Image (spheres, coloured by chain):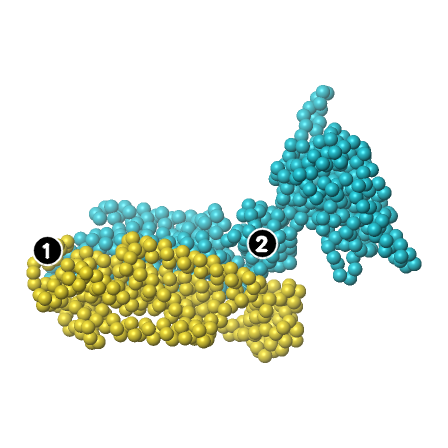
Chain colours: A yellow, B cyan
Amino acid sequence: MSVWRDLYRGDTRFDFFGNRRRWFTISGVIVAVSLFALVFLRLDLGVDFEGGTLVEFENPNAVSVTAVRSIVDGLDIGGGRVQEVGGQGIRVQTAQLDPADEDRLVDALAALLGEAPEDASRLSVGPTFGSQVAESALRALIVFLIVVALFMAWRLEWKMAGAALIALAHDLIFTAGIYALVGFEVSPATVIAILTILGYSLYDTVVVFDKIQENVRERGDRHAFGSIVNLSMNQVLMRSINTSLTTLIPISSLLFVGSFLLGATTLREFALALFVGVATGTYSSIFLAAPILGVWKEGEEHWIKVRRRVERKGAEDDFAPTHGATVPAASMVGATGSGAVPRPPRKRRKHRR
Amino acid sequence: MTRRSALITLGMTLAVVYGGMALTQLGGVRPLLGLDLQGGFSVVLEAEEGTDPEVLDQAVEIMRRRIEALGGVQEPEIAVVGDSTVEVQLPGVTDRDRALEAVGTTGSLEFRPVRQVSPIPGVSPVFFGATPTPEPEPDTTTTTVPSVGGTTSTTAGEGTASTTTTTTVPEGSTTTEPSTTTTTLDPTEGIVLPAGVTWCDEVEQAGCVDRESGLTVDPDPTLDAFLTTGPAGGDIIYHTAPARILGSDLEGAQAQFSGGTSGSGNVVGSWVVVLDFTAEGGDKFAEVTRELANYAIGDPRRQFAIVLDGEVQSAPQVSPEVDPNTGITGGSAIITLGSSADQEEEARSLSVVLRYGALPAAFEISTVQSVSATLGSDSLRAGLIAGFGGLALVAMAMILYYRALGLVNVIGLTVFGSLMLMVFSLLGEWQGVTLTLAGVAGVIVAVGITSDSYVVYFERIKEEVHRGRSLRSAIDHAFSRSIRTILTADTVSFTGAVLLFFLAVGSVKGFALALLIATVCDVLVAVFFTRPAVALVAMSRLGDGGRFSVRGATGLPPEGTS
């Protein structure tokens, strides 16, 4: 009850910064596994990227995949991949066909499945188009990153921009790694999802860093940077949890509805990337971006001085990192905002009771 | 924020948003659905690298014309994407083949001098023996050097002598094969074809002439061609010279009625098509008409054929008053038709042909997609169920957690939803912007972002209250602080969305647009709805006391007891 109550009231004292090695190790393992998956399992690029022809039909009479496959093989169009999609549809994917062959395929499938040929969903993509889409997405991504980094450097500071980008790279690699591991097909929807993750991960990190910056302004000369990171993390913890929940709920609903109820595979694959991305985005902004920033800033001359001063005075600092691996101080309820600093508050901007 | 100003702001916001939403929806203004949501057909065409952007724009215009001619297409969306790609989206289109033809075929508009006209409609001049004896070939030298040949061609074409200047090697003499095969009963036997032109064999080569019909199957602009006007034009078949002017040389064409009143007071005049050439095209046209004007009035060779996609659309004569020494100069010309209604029609359609007939660039079809209507509506249904389901769950969680403030959030989400619906309806109506599956996904994601803005604000209120502020001062302080955070975070999203919108292709664009609109709506809702609503709630009985109150949500006992 008490942890929950502390959470609810924003009174937690988790030592995020002190445990940074643990988080860095976790993230390192995640990234290593993801990279391994990406290199050895490869991403399954969809028709949109590789080129090819894709025909999709509803399958109300539940014709078996084997039957469809034999029809497709009988057409002599160089084979193809037959898949069931969402339990309600049949998808046939081949190398790019010329229009006549594509029509033959559609007609044959329509006859077998008892559907009208017009009810087919068809997609035929030339081999160059995908690389163009990928290229344009990549270009958009790079420009986006540069612009956002500049914006964050201006609005916050450049080290924050740097830390945010590292956290972002972590999220992207992890999401891509999941795709490689699970073997989901990468479609344009996936690209969109990944771009969303970009936005979301940055958004989340910006909120966290905004809080750090505010705390630095308020008590920068009295607390070591690590303490401020801890304080800020604890302050935004509930927000982060709540935000992730409110974001993940619609996404899960997309995942659930898309995947189980309606068999809309596009939705499912899209939602999976979003789900993974949002979850890691939240994780990385708290456990990765902020500690990285902390390590980085603690090396600054100003913060070394502050740190020495705080340590010399032996001041009791609620949020001082323990530099160990323990999670302390969930018991320190009641110290709310008492500002346990021995000397009188000088540059305090806000009056507190 | 005072109670009065909060009430006014809130009232106005709700009136504008709900009123606007009701007006658009009752007025039948609905979001346009993209083809992945309602079924339809999309094509991505690629031009060669380095194609002039203007040429692409022109091609888009021509495609739009052709698609409109198809009829029954709701809101076709044709856009140039990137450097050399044209994306065509035709929601609701089921006739694949016709649609493909409309956007994909590269019409070629050519002006070809006429060499010979069939004396009997439907019978090709190719069957009337060899090419006309006085080989009218003053142009073989001039066409090859069109720009510098200005002066040389004047001398070559000077006077009536041009008809007899057979300076070139007569092709007829070099093609000796037909004479060796005199024994077969081939209808084509003994016929001498123009230079470079062959009879069609099993494998059709460019510019070849069909043995049966005597028509050129696939006209090559650099070769002679036997072309028909088609049934509408009385099946007249022309033997035409290589193309001298192409569609790209033409700047514009317009149908006009030209005339006035005659001396006796009757209205006289006729329908004309006014042609405007580009600078280069004007020079070429002057050159061609100068050559043509050297033929006698009434000679079939005094006309040029306007050919679109291998069919002669019109074959106007060069008028008697044209000076054979200069031709028609000045970069523009008039084709005079007549004054009847038929001719009005003809003038209009000819001007359309001239303006839009040819796609100025060669396109390659790189992606063709058709989505069946049932699949589209399934996706829409799935998206909506997911959206509403997600909203309901978020609403429940927020009320549980933030009590009275959660209620504000729930109403805020309906305000946000109404705003999005209104914006998409209006954008669809005014700009033809369609809502795609990716867009729906963007909106669903935006629900998360909007909720986040509330969470940021509410958490801040809690924090301020914990610091010991009174509820009223806490909500004001919390707002001015959290709006900074929200603005910073939204700026990041907004920047991303704008960049994506301008740099990305296809469905990513739809997503970016939805996200872009959503971030703007998010800020608007925060300022014009959330702030006054929270202020009012805090000032009301829901502010203090009770577990459901704002203060209750902060976990602190009611004011005064602490």
Q: Measuring 46% from the left and 56% from the top, which residue is drawn there?
A: B504
Please tell me whether mark 1 or mark 2 is closer to you in this view.
2
Residue position for label 2: B48
In the picture of the structure, the residue carrying the numbered disc 1 is A346
**Amino acid at dot 1:** Arg
Corner quadrant of residue B341? top right
Q: The numbered mark 1 sits on a residue in which chain?
A: A
Q: CA distance from mark 1 to mark 2?
A: 69 Å
Q: Check the image and name the residue furthest to the right.
A: B183
Picture residue at 64% right of the left edge, 71% below the top: A77
A238 or B509: which is nearer to us?
B509
**Chain to which mark 2 belongs:** B
Closer to the camera in the image, A152 or A269: A152
Residue B68 visible in the snapshot = no
Residue A66 x/y as whole percent: 59, 79
Q: Amino acid at mark 2?
A: Glu
Secondary structure of residue under mark 2: loop
Percent coordinates x, y for residue B380 in the rendering: 48, 62
- Quarter of the image for residue B88 reads bottom right
* B107, above or below A120, in the image: above
Q: Residues within 10 Å of mark 1 (few under 14, many from 20)?
A: few
Q: Is residue A317 visible?
A: yes
On screen, residue B410 above or below B263: below
State the residue at coordinates (71%, 33%).
Answer: B327
